[in-house]
Image (spheres, grey):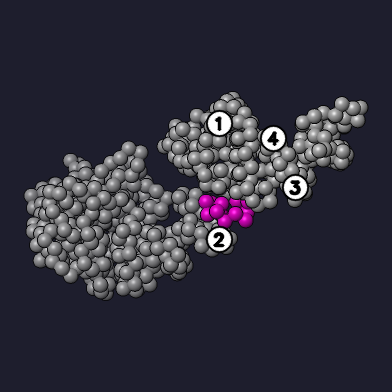
Amino acid sequence: MTDNPYNREPESEEAGFFRELLQASLEAHRKNQFDRAESGYREILSRYPDHAATRDLYGTLLYQTNRLEAAAANLERAVGLDPGQAPAWNHLGAVRLAQGRPSDALDAFRKATDADPQNPEAWLNRSRLAEMRGDIADAVLAARTAVERLPNYPVTLARLGAALLAAGRFEEAIAPLEAASVRAPDNVEPYLHLAICLKQAAQGQRSQAALRKALLLAPERAVLYPHLSGEPAGEHSSVDLVSWARRAVCLAPRDGGLWAALAAACEAKKLDASAVTAAKRSLLLVPDGHAAHHCLALPLFRLERFAEAAKTSRHALLLYPDIAELYFVAAACAFIFGDPETGWRYYEARAGSRIDSARVGLPPTWDWKSVPDRLLVAAEQGVGDEYIFFSRLGCLQGRAREITVECDPRNRRLFQRSFPDFRFIDRQLKGREGREAYFDYGTAVAELGFDNAILAGSLLARFVQDARLLGPLSYLVPDADDVETWRRYFRARTSLPLIGLCWRGGASSIARDRLYCDAITMVEGLGPQRGYYVNLVYSLRDGELEQVRNRLGCDIHDPTGIDQKNELDRLAAMLSVLDAVVSVDTAVCPLAAAVGTPTLRLGRGLLYLSDGYDAVLGSCHPMSPRAEPFDMRFCLDRSAQKLREILISPN
């Protein structure tokens, strides 16, 4: 039997020489002097071919110099000679993994931990590969064992955190990842994994702080950027996602996902031209990218590139029929180009994929053919949309034995008076901490026994089939006593025609503000004052009306004794006594038209259905053509001319 130094060291001068040679070769190996080390190992193995330790060292060197087959052969011989040699099993696992044999590699790593349960490196390798192979339980077990062997070692702590993250045990993962980042503050991975776990644990600010530390350490790591979010980074600041995303695409310009992230960041801030450019770049790289399709159609629509928006939204819907916003873009574009049939088809497809609050317990959708016992008309969007949608509510009369309509509580008295045969209930909205509100119909269904439901917007899809027809001139009935009170109120102040002005809504955003103006612009655009101006902006800014008076010598009366935001029934009565209203796209516009007051809408027709008249509310007069770019000055010029006509011949 050949002498084996593991079993019996030769008692000879030659054996001493070879021990010194092994030590010298190992030292050269540690210094990456591979030629010298290999020469020594080969000389030893020529005399002691069954020396397991040398087979392990030689096989490891062959692996390091990318000679995988020879490396595997030597390491397999090493573990065959000494199955209890944990380092050789560990090295063999690495070689098998490099050979594309992950199952065999994992088997080798497990044998390494069996041979030496105190070997943390073997446990780490076993954990990493078990996670890659989808055996998350073993990955966590191996990582936890590695931490037990080296409890303060940042690599073992980071591995345990990563394994727990893969297992979805986010809160458990936080402690080891935080410990790893403290012990190795220059290591990026623990920060990234910590950021993900904190975000999943609803600790958004801490998540973003960890991610920013990673970015400071490795700003060239493109993989970090998509995890940034717009959550507050501090009391008075927030993460500038656009800047970070732009940096990311510079680092990895061929990464379609990063271009999509840039498109999303730009779209969120309504930087529409930049969003379009980034989304198109992403789609060149990843033609079926979900996020890029999501972020292209809306900016194109807001940029009034309607033909492109129509094509883009329809194409995207073929790939992703779950993106609700695309249905609205496709519908609006069809209306703009005079195809209401297609428009309503897309519009109705929004049902079940709404972009507003989620709905729990909504009764089955009515098929419009049967006669339900108890039909629910479910609310959609804001108060202004209710004035638009409910313009066709009367068409439901007799189609169900009992009809209940969900509405904003501020509108309930007004709607109940206007539709005495229907029941009205408040919106069934429920709040939840840190998340969006949702509709919960459980209590209402239990109490009122609804058997079918429709969404309020579906009334228009059903009953506005011919967009060539003028909509109703009025349908809401204000309180008669309130109407008389407002008549007396204004008669005491003026005998001039009453003209309501609304230049801005309560909510401000980049998208909305494009369609708004200011009081001075509106009054200047309408030309010489022809009546008594009445303020219809409930969120006046300090000194806003005084600026109009000082600059233009024109008064805008701000009605007293009314909360125009919340007292909507009284607001409807006040609007009904005005001779005309000039309004941007706010709830004031459809409410004024719904009570029959001639309303000059500084924008396109409601739902983009018509030009020069309104197919939804006949007393609404759109000032902007559907398919042309919006221009506030043009709208004001047309309004000035239309206002003259109305005041000369109010009927």
User: Badge 1 is on which residue?
Assistant: 145
Q: Is residue 67 left or right of residue 275?
A: right
Viewer-proximal residue, 536 or 349? Answer: 349
Report the Cα–Cα distance between label 3 and label 4.
16 Å
Please provide the residue range marked out in magenta: 249-262
Query: Residue at position x 15%, y 49% from top?
Result: 446
Q: Nearer the viewer, mark 4 or mark 2?
A: 4
- Residues at badges 4 and 2 in contact (C-beta under 8 Å)? no
Say few, some or many: other residues with alpha carbon within 10 Å of mark 2 (under 14 / 14 to 19 / 20 or more).
some
In the rendered image, which quarter contains the C terminus? bottom left
Report the Cα–Cα distance between label 3 and label 2.
43 Å
Q: Identify the main secondary structure in magenta.
A: helix
Image vertical order of residue 622 relative to residue 137, above or below: below
Earlier-in-chain disc, 3 versus 4: 3
Q: Secondary structure at mark 4?
A: loop
User: Badge 2 is on which residue?
Assistant: 286
Q: Quadrant of residue 321?
A: bottom left
Image vertical order of residue 63 relative to residue 114, above or below: below
User: Badge 4 is on which residue?
Assistant: 85
Image vertical order of residue 73 relative to residue 400, above or below: above
Earlier-in-chain disc, 2 versus 1: 1
Residue type pointed to by label 4: Gln
User: Badge 3 is on which residue?
Assistant: 73
Report the Cα–Cα distance between label 1 and label 3.
30 Å
Query: Residue at position x 14%, y 47% from top?
Result: 489
